[in-house]
């Protein structure tokens, strides 16, 4: 490289120079690292340059310094020193990277240009500039050597005015032409900054200056000016803006409140979190006095500690409660050259949690149940180490905290401790699962205890398992009582089995008797019905109207008695018949029964809805009897409705089972008499209103119970009824 390059530590000691330095100074690398620039900078420049460099090292900001540096032959040449800090991931400066650019010729050129008033004014402002003139009226453009170098063309290059303007970007050329024309025609001077593309396509930023030159008569004979290459300045400005943006973004993204306060105790910066914590807009606080905007801080810990940090120039951290905001703050005060930087956090919730934690710890220590907390460590046969036990543990086991902390639960094991249960607990813990158990342990005195244990893993906010907590209850007395109850239950079960067998025998005999009686009653009823019909047919002309009425009543009574006997036979048959379980399509059964009802009463207007896919596991014939009775009742009791509606469907039950239902909008019933619905021969409506035997719902109840299910009903007078049933495990 044509430039000298050096690297320096954050403390100011040099660590490396490139070959250009060695060639320029004539020093070896060892000499250079040992002495640096000592004795090489011109005496007139040494103090100024040293101070500027020290300021840069202290502030960590990039810097530029011009000074004369002695060459190996003793000649001093002007150098432009640029130094840039290199930072690590935390933002700390770890080293400095610097360059030395030979600007001696530029300095000499500037001194020559001072003879010309215009060029003296331009050269006095900046370096890297090139002059130009436009002679009038021909408008001949002339570039200086430096101007040619700026535009990456060889010295002596003479562009036309159009070519010169063509180095500006197309969208900016009208602006340039406007300035040039105003200067040519009216003598208006101008200065602007625009980007250009050099002959090599390199994008540069230039500051353009122009003014008119008049002759003795005041006529404009030419315009002249300069281009200053300010690309490095622009790059530095962009870098500075990026750093400022990065710093602002960082300060805005942190969860702490942050503010800067100058030496007059006025706010100069607040981040968004500070606005939210202080409940004030930064626009209302910037430039305002801290003590005036927050008067309650006067005389408080905030004022005392902040002034102490400034006075002693040291960082101070403290916690304090600010009453107007009802907030606890954790505050860090850092003294700076211009005042203080303050970081603060809202710790109100944290202090509340700490108070709750202390309260919880006190409460746990007072529990009668034992609480044990262990590490979430690698498992071995003994289990993880204990880190906490409450007072109840000491009372129940006789072990002190000193004896238990750091030990494992093996301390409590004994001869009758169930190893199979320990293995089950260990397997659950290896899977980080909650586990409950009852296990035998032993006190320090050797007394046997039965403990009911609940073990649960504890995780932190990241989801990492940190501890196990076990809540242990002494159930020794309960276990002893259970043992006594089991002994009593064993005797009771023997008695119940004997009594059940006796009841089963009696029920079987009763069912057989009911079947026999019902069967034997059918023959005399048939005789009565037959002779009454024969009498009405043979002697009809000799029988009075009253007699005919009586004969008709006899026939109706015989038919009703027949239906009752048939119902009794069916009920007895259902109690004895073996169930044949298979999948039953209740939807298909309901639609078949619907068709039968419509065929019997084709004139009825009934809207029936049957849900598809009602599949149940049970005896097809018996479940058909259930639907036959329920749908026949719905059909019957909705007969007085102008538009009867019947619905067959299902819904999820509270016990994860399926609840089937038959719903109608018929006569309904009073829920006060629900207990009578499923009784044998029980009726809630008079035979004159709705005929029936009172056995249908008893049959439904018996079939459902034989299937291990439940049946119940809901209704309202004149608002319909819904009959529900479930099918569980068949009996």
Image: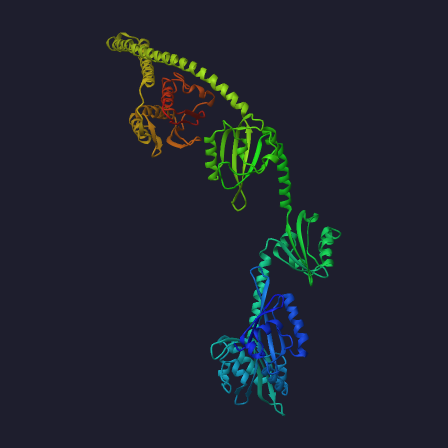
**215 in relation to 583, above or below:** below
Residue 282 lies, in percent from the top left, at 65, 58
Q: Residue at x 54, y 83 (%)?
A: 147
- The mark total stands at 0
From the viewer's perspective, is 58 left or right of 670? right
Farthest right residue in view: 299
Inspect this view and state whether residue 549 appears.
no
Say above or below: 493 vs 13.
above
Residue at screen point 64% across, 44% down: 351
Q: Residue furthest bottom?
A: 216
Is residue 707 among the parts visible in the rendering?
yes
Nearest the camera: 62 or 428?
Answer: 428
Please state the horizontal and vertical placement of residue 344, each as a whole percent of the image: 65, 53
Q: Tell whether 42 sits left or right of 669.
A: right
Quadrant of the rendered image containing residue 614:
top left
Residue 460 coordinates in the image, percent (x, y): 54, 44
Relative height, residue 541 to residue 257 (above, below): above
In the shown orientation, is residue 232 left or right of residue 698?
A: right
Q: Which residue is pictured at 62% across the width and 74% down the height? A: 37
Which quarter of the figure has residue 268? bottom right
Applied colour scheme: rainbow
* Viewer-nearest residue: 656 or 105: 105
Q: Position of residue 34 (x, y in %)?
A: 61, 71
Q: Residue lying farthest left?
A: 538
In terms of depth relative to the viewer, which is nearer, 81 or 12?
12
Q: Quadrant of the C terminus?
A: top left
Residue 538 quadrant: top left
**Which of the pair 518/579 is nearer the observer?**
579
């Amino acid at each position: 490289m044509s430039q000298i390059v050096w690297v320096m530590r954050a403390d100011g000691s040099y660590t490396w120079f490139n070959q250009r330095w060695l060639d320029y100074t004539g020093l070896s690398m060892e000499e250079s690292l040992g002495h640096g620039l000592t004795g090489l900078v011109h005496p007139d420049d040494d103090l100024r340059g040293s101070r500027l460099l020290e300021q840069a090292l202290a502030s960590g900001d990039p810097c530029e310094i011009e000074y004369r540096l002695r060459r190996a032959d003793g000649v001093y040449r002007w150098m432009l020193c640029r130094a840039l800090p290199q930072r690590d991931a935390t933002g700390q400066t770890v080293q400095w990277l610097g360059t030395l650019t030979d600007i001696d010729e530029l300095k000499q050129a500037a001194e020559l240009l001072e003879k010309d008033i215009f060029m003296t004014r331009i050269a006095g402002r900046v370096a890297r500039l090139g002059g130009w003139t436009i002679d009038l009226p021909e408008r001949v453009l002339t570039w200086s050597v430096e101007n040619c170098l700026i535009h990456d063309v060889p010295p002596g290059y003479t562009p036309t005015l159009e070519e010169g303007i063509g180095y500006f970007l197309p969208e900016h050329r009208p602006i340039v032409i406007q300035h040039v024309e105003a200067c040519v025609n009216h003598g208006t001077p101008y200065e602007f900054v625009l980007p250009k593309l050099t002959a090599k396509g390199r994008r540069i930023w230039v500051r353009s200056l122009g003014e008119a030159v008049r002759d003795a008569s005041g006529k404009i004979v030419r315009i002249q000016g300069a281009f200053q290459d300010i690309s490095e300045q622009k790059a530095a400005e962009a870098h500075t803006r990026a750093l400022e943006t990065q710093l602002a973004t960082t300060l805005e993204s942190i969860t702490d409140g942050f503010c800067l306060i100058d030496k007059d105790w006025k706010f100069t910066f607040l981040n968004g979190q500070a606005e939210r914590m202080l409940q004030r807009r930064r626009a209302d606080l910037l430039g305002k006095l801290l003590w005036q905007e927050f008067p309650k801080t006067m005389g408080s810990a905030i004022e005392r500690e902040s002034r102490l940090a400034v006075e002693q120039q040291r960082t101070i951290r403290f916690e304090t409660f600010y009453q107007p905001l009802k907030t606890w703050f954790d505050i860090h005060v850092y003294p700076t050259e211009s005042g203080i930087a303050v970081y603060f956090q809202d710790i109100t919730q944290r202090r509340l949690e700490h108070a709750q934690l202390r309260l919880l710890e006190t409460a746990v220590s007072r529990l009668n149940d034992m609480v044990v907390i262990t590490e979430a460590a690698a498992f071995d046969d003994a289990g993880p180490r204990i880190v906490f036990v409450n007072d109840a543990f000491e009372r129940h086991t006789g072990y002190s905290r000193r004896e238990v902390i750091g030990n494992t639960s093996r301390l409590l094991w004994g001869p009758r401790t169930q190893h199979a249960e320990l293995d089950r607990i260990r397997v659950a813990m290896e899977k980080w699962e909650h586990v409950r158990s009852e296990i035998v342990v032993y006190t320090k005195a050797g007394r046997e205890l039965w403990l009911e244990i609940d073990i649960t893993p504890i995780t932190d906010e990241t989801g990492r398992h940190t501890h196990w907590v076990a809540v242990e209850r002494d159930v020794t007395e309960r276990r002893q009582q259970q043992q006594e109850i089991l002994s009593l239950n064993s005797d009771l079960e023997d008695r119940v089995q004997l009594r059940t067998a006796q009841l089963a025998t009696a029920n079987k005999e009763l069912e057989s008797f009911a079947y026999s009686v019902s069967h034997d009653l059918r023959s005399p009823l048939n005789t009565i019905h037959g002779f009454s019909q024969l009498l009405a047919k043979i002697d009809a002309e000799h029988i009075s109207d009253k007699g005919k009425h009586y004969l008709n009543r006899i026939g109706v009574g015989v038919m009703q008695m027949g239906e009752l006997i048939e119902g009794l036979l069916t009920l007895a048959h259902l109690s004895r018949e073996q169930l044949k379980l298979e999948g039953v399509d209740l939807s298909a059964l309901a639609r078949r029964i619907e068709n039968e009802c419509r065929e019997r009463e084709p004139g009825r207007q009934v809207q029936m809805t049957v849900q598809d896919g009602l599949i149940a596991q049970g005896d097809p014939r018996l479940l058909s009897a259930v639907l036959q009775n329920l749908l026949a009742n719905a059909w019957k009791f909705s007969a007085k409705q102008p538009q009867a509606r019947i619905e067959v469907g299902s819904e999820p039950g509270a016990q994860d089972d399926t609840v089937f239902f038959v719903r109608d909008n018929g006569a309904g019933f009073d829920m006060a008499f629900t207990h009578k619905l499923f009784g044998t021969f029980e009726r809630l409506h008079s035979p004159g209103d709705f005929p029936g035997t009172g056995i249908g719902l008893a049959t439904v109840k018996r079939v459902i119970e034989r299937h291990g299910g439940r049946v119940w009903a809901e209704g309202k007078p004149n608002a319909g009824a819904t009959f529900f049933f479930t099918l569980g495990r068949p009996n």
